[in-house]
Image (cartoon, rainbow, N blue to C red):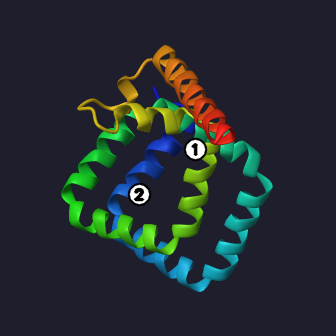
Amino acid sequence: MLTAKEKKVESDRQYRENNREKIKDYSGRHYAANKDRIKKYHKKYRDENAAERAVYAKAYREEHREEDAIKQRARYSENIDCERLRSKRYTEKNKDEISARYKKNRINITDVYVRQAISRRQSFNSEDIPQQLIELKRMHIKLERLIKEVNTKQQ
């Protein structure tokens, strides 16, 4: 035997199933008539709950990292020409920023710079390089710079 609440839920579900088009039409007309008000409401919600939304988004990204990586690789491989063009445009548009970033990495001998220095002429990915090797290469680069500095002072 169904309770009154269960009967109401079932009745509402039946109504939605039988009147899908009518509901869809009404929703579309309602949204069109109240578009600005709805957008303001959503913006206000986003602004008021930015911190909570950021935490949720971060957790979601971490939870779905592998799925997202697969989707990104598939999208990239399907649109490789567009991606190369996008990359080229970005590089041309942001030459100064990219140059400054490379210079900063070179001066500070960051992990990114060291990984690139190691894998530049090799056939493996920079992700495969262990942290210990990065530290050794960093010391090697510092030593080479010191030797070069000493030699220039002596001349």
Quick check: 136 left or right of 21? right
Residue in front for this viewpoint, 23 or 78? 78
Kindly state the secondary structure of the residue where label 2 is placed: helix
Q: Amino acid at mark 2?
A: Tyr
Quickly name the residue at label 2. 15
Which percent across, then down, holds residue 96?
57, 68
Query: Of the residues shown, which amino acid type is indicated by label 1?
Result: Arg
Provide the secondary structure element on which disc 1 rests: helix
Residue at (65, 73) in percent of width and height: 39
**Disc 1 residue crowd, few under 14, some 14–19, many 20+, Cα 10 Å:** some
| Number of other residues with Cα within 10 Å of mark 2, as a class: few under 14, some 14 to 19, many 20 or more | few
Position of 3 compared to 34: left or right?
A: left
Which numbered circle lies on residue 29?
Answer: none
CA gap, disc 1 to disc 2?
Answer: 67 Å
Q: Along the polypeptide, which appears first: circle 1 or circle 2? A: 2
Instruction: Name which residue lies at 69% across and 78% down.
Output: 37
Q: Name the image quarter holding residue 123.
A: top left
Q: Position of residue 34 (x, y in %)?
A: 63, 81
What residue would you read off at disc 1?
Answer: 106
Choose between 49 and 7: the one closer to the eye.
Answer: 49
Say which quadrant the C terminus sits in.
Answer: top right
Foreground residue among 45 and 3: 45
- In the rendered image, the quadrant that contains the N terminus is top left
In terms of image quadrants, where is residue 22? bottom left
Q: Residue furthest front?
A: 155
Judge whether 131 appears above or below 2 on screen. Answer: above
Q: How far across and down, in percent of the image, does residue 60 sit?
A: 53, 37
Q: In the image, 140: left or right of 150?
A: left
Residue 64 at x, y = what percent?
44, 34
